[in-house]
Image (spheres, rainbow, N blue to C red):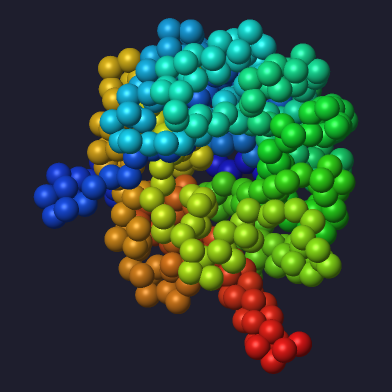
Amino acid sequence: MAIGVQSGPPADTSEWPLNLDVKGLLEIGWRPTPFRQFILKIHSRCNLACDYCYVYEMADQSWRRQPRRMARETIDAAALRIAEHVHDNGLSQVEVILHGGEPLLAGADHIRYAVTALRAAVDPAVDVSVLLQTNGVLLDTVFLDLFDALDVSVGVSVDGDAESHDRHRVRANGTGSYAAVRTGLEKLTSPRYRHLFNGVLSTIDLRGDPVTTYESLLQFAPPTMDFLLPHGNWDFPPPGLSPHGAATPYADWLVALFDRWYGARKQETHVRLFSEIIRMLLGQASRTEAIGLSPVTVVVVETDGSLEQVDSLKAAYEGAADTAMHVARDAFDAALLHPAIAARQLGSRALSAECTGCDVKRICGGGLYPHRYRSGRGFLNASVYCRDLFRLITHIHRTLANDVAMLRKGS
């Protein structure tokens, strides 16, 4: 299921947005939005070998050069930089996500050190929420007791039922991981630890039935489900999608799931993609980078302390997420002025001509940024999922409009 690997050197600096004139933007009054979400890659390796992973299986192979575990000195530097950014921008709340690789490989003591250092560095009046995203294989009571003590919420990556999950989320020897993940989830969702459960993240596989996938995840009663489109772009389309064809296989899959979710007698869980589309159709701003035009306020600190853009960009080409900055010498405020980061805070000004003329541009927002890449043009394109997104958004809009019409009639 992995897409092809872009060969040769990184994209030319003439590709958009590396040629963006940030100085010119500042001169006409544009100002960046501070970062509010900090992703710390505390461990760069993984105990699974998922075949669709953007870190290990796609274009950017820089993980091979990363230290396995983030050093305590790097954690301290990151904590101080976050505190500096919070203070200088007058922020009252930020989120830190412990990520990998598989972050649990860092060990309980190292995770304790990281969370303690982060909270100690920031003013006590600031709310620092901490989330750990894990594949769930190593989740046990030692980690869960630690997360309970430190007030760390936990998200788990799981791709539906055993068949769908084990098709892609396998160990290095090819054996499936579902049984181990299920055991971890059962511990996490037990009465003692359920309050730590942040939700599940699932990558869409067209071979899996959408309703079966949803209901198999629903058995764990997650507060949130997040369904991700597999990473791909115009050079290397995602599995099962012909970007120049009329078919919309991913929209078809998501529409079936939406109808099942929306048609339930009472809300069973929060599905982020659907809820965000509904919010925006009702006039609210987006709260996710996947859709909408809200400024992206996420930055990544790699295991070696490098500052990077969102790491899903690694699916595009080698070095796509790089900023040439480091947490030991560069402030996060400086990273905000990097052309590629600034471009993701420009709203409709960063859309392609094709997107600018689209009826759903405010909702779609061009789609997830990595899915827009085309060599020679960079990211100034519509999403490779353009037709799928249009069909999904218009289906949800039509469903809401029909319900509103029924309400107005007093039904």
Q: Is 203 situated left or right of 116 in this image?
A: right
Query: At x 85% / y 53%, what residue is drawn?
Result: 215
**Nearer the observer, 338 or 184:** 184
Residue 361 visible? The answer is yes
Query: At x 41% / y 23%, what residue is drawn?
Result: 123
**Nearer the observer, 169 or 70:** 70
Residue 43: image quadrant is top right
Q: Is 325 situated left or right of 134 in this image?
A: left
**Nearer the observer, 7 or 54:** 54
Query: How many callouts does the rendering have?
Result: 0
The percent position of residue 152, horizontal first and vertical second, equals: 64, 26
Which quadrant of the figure contains the C terminus? Answer: bottom right
The percent position of residue 174, horizontal first and vertical second, equals: 79, 28
Query: At x 82% / y 59%, what residue is drawn?
Result: 211
User: Going by the picture, which residue comes out furthest to the left?
Assistant: 27
Residue 202 visible? The answer is no
**Nearer the observer, 15 or 298:** 298
User: Going by the picture, which residue comes out furthest to the front?
Assistant: 125
Q: Is residue 259 above or below residue 345?
A: below
The percent position of residue 33, horizontal first and vertical second, equals: 32, 45
Query: At x 45% / y 30%, what residue is drawn?
Result: 126
The percent position of residue 268, horizontal first and vertical second, equals: 79, 56
Which quadrant of the figure contains the N terminus? Answer: top right
Q: Is 389 situated left or right of 136 in this image?
A: left
